Each structure stands twice: as C-alpha cells, then as structure tokens.
C-alpha cells in the first residue's frame, strides 16, 4: 500500500514538480549567490504552484531565517532548507481516519462537484476493510443524483444506507440513521450533507438542525466534521474552506483530485492559512485511491 500510494502521489504531483521543483532546481543551479533576486524568483515559483501569496511570504521569511542560522552561502543547499520549512508547516503527524473511539458520527460537507459522495463511498470501504461496522446517511436530499450516487457507493462498499425521498428534511434522514446506527450497534455513521454554500444561511440552519438531532439522540457518539475540497480549484478551495468555517467547526480536510491536473502546493496553503489538517487525499478514481495523508511522504514526493 505504502509503495502504491507514494508512486500515485508522485505521479499526481507531476504538474507541481514541473511548476515547482524543476524550476527551483534550474534556478538554484544557475545562481551564484543567495541574494534578494534569488528570493524574488523563488517567491514567484511558489505562488505559481498554488501556494498562495500569504503562505509564500511566510515560507520565504522562514527560509531566510534558516539560511542565516545555518550560515549557508551555497545556493545549491537552499532546496534542503526549503524542504525543512515545508515539513515544519505541515507537521510530521500522519493522519488517520480511524475513530478514536466508537460510536462516531462523521459529517461530510463541501460544495457540489468536489467529490463528496465519492469520498464518503471510499471512506466507508476503507473503514469496513479495517473491521468497522459502517452506516451511510443520504442527507443531501436536494440533489436527486446525490442519493442515487450514494446508493451505488453503498453497494460497492457493501455498507448499509439510510435514505428518504428527494426533497425530504435532511435532519429527519439523520434522525432515522441515528436510530438505525444505535439498533445495529454501528461503529461509524457517515452523513452526506447538501453543499449549497451560495445560500449560507440555509446551510447553517440545516447543519445546525442535523447537529441538534445528533446531540439529542446520539450524545454518546464522537463527532467529526470533514470538509471536501477539490485540489484543482487552487486558491479558490482555501476561500471555500474559510466560508464553511463560518458555518461550522471543521476537524479535517479531504482533498480530492490530486492526481494530474492539480498543483499540490494547495496542501501547504490550506494547512498554513486555515490550520486545519489535510486528513485524506484523493490520488485516483479507484475505491482505494483515497489515502490517509502523510506530510513527510508528500514532501518527499514533491521534491
């Protein structure tokens, strides 16, 4: 699994490597001294790799400090310092989707089209393979396709699903799912939710209602809210996350579509700008291509 994930990640980061690592290597191999011009060029490369302006300025600042501390004069050694700075931002802790204790309820939020339903299917399959008893709740009732799609994933992952008709009250679906989860001694209940961020007030009310149902009916359960973001949307993903953070607290990020067209710098930007850990990354279409995020492996794959 490790080798497979690392290889997929490396392949997925090809675009970032072209935009980022190779440009940095070329620039440093041609540089004679570490000066303001070098830092400026580096800044430009980082911004074009989707790292974002604020995070880039922070990285350059920390890089200058490290280079001063280590009294480095040779430009070819800058790359290793940069790697250290990025690891410092991401932290060294590997993420896990396994519950700390059961039962657990995972609420999955995110705008339509980011791969929310697919992520739920893949998480369900992963947890089931790890020996947990999993139940899905189709609480995105406003999009007919969302219920059908989740049903397809429930049979692929061989996990039960609780659903109502399209247009039903999402909180009512969650209520029924909670009763079923308790009756069936489920370890993890995963709830899909609607992704209408353009109407924040509705979304806030809806998530509030769902959370109240869980508080009242399933108070003993651990709670985790995961936000799904599409890596291909770059800095727009960070903005989306900020808006969702106004609506509810977020425990972790699922970053999808990190397999080819995305610029992987967004991972660094998310962690620095929002201080929310990226827990899972999507590196392909397959059922086991949603993988727990390992910062060290990510930085290795990047460089």
Image (cartoon, rainbow, N blue to C red):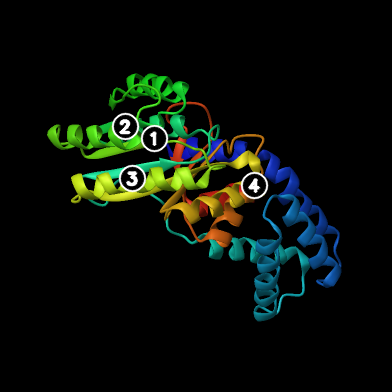
Left or right, 235 with respect to 145, comes to right
To which residue does mark 2 refer? 137
Quadrant of the frame with the N terminus: top left
Tell me where residue 140 appears, x and y as whole percent.
41, 32
Q: Cβ–Cβ below 8 Å for labels 2 and 1?
A: yes
Mark yes or no: residue 213 visible. Answer: yes
Distance CA(mark 2)–CA(mark 1): 6 Å
Distance CA(mark 2)–CA(mark 3): 15 Å
- Choose between 49 and 105: the one closer to the eye: 105
Which disc number belongs to residue 236?
A: 4
If you read the primary sequence from the N terminus, does the residue marked by circle 2 or circle 3 appear first? 2
Mark yes or no: residue 128 visible. Answer: no
Q: Cβ–Cβ below 8 Å for labels 3 and 1?
A: no
Distance CA(mark 4)–CA(mark 3): 28 Å
Element on which disc 1 rests: strand
Q: Is residue 147 above or below residue 21?
A: above
What residue is rendered at 44% in x and 25% in y? Answer: 146
Mark 4 or mark 3, which is nearer to you?
Answer: 3
- Choose between 124 and 112: the one closer to the eye: 112
To which residue does mark 1 refer? 192
What residue is rendered at 40% in x and 28% in y? Answer: 141
Element on which disc 4 rests: helix
Tell me where residue 193 appears, x and y as whole percent.
41, 37
Quadrant position of residue 36 = bottom right
Tell me where residue 142 appears, x and y as whole percent.
45, 28
Element on which disc 3 rests: helix
Distance CA(mark 3)–CA(mark 1): 14 Å
């Amino acid at each position: 699994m490790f080798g497979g994930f690392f290889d997929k990640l490396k392949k997925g980061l090809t675009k970032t490597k072209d935009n980022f690592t190779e440009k940095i290597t070329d620039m440093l191999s041609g540089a004679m001294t570490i000066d303001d011009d070098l830092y400026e060029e580096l800044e430009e490369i980082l911004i074009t790799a989707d790292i974002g302006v604020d995070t880039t300025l922070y990285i350059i600042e920390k890089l200058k400090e490290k280079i001063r501390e280590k009294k480095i004069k040779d430009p070819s050694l800058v790359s290793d310092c940069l790697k250290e700075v990025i690891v410092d931002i991401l932290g060294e802790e590997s993420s896990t989707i396994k519950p700390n204790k059961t039962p657990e309820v995972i609420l999955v939020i995110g705008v339509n089209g980011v791969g929310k339903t697919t992520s739920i299917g893949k998480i369900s399959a992963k947890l089931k393979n790890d020996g947990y008893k999993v139940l899905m709740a189709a609480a995105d009732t406003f999009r007919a396709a969302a219920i059908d799609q989740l049903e397809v994933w429930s049979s692929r992952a061989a996990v039960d699903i609780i659903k109502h008709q399209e247009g039903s009250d999402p909180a009512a679906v969650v209520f029924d799912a909670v009763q079923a989860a308790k009756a069936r001694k489920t370890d993890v209940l995963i709830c899909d939710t609607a992704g209408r961020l353009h109407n924040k007030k509705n979304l806030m009310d809806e998530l509030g209602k769902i959370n109240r149902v869980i508080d009242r009916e399933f108070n003993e359960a651990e709670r985790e809210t995961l936000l799904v973001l599409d890596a291909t949307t770059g800095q727009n993903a960070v903005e989306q996350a900020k808006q969702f953070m106004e609506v509810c607290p977020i425990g972790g990020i699922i970053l999808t579509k990190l397999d080819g067209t995305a610029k992987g710098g967004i991972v660094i930007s998310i962690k620095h700008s929002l201080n929310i850990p990226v827990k899972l990354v999507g590196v392909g279409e397959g059922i086991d291509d949603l993988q727990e995020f390992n910062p060290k492996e990510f930085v290795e794959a990047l460089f």
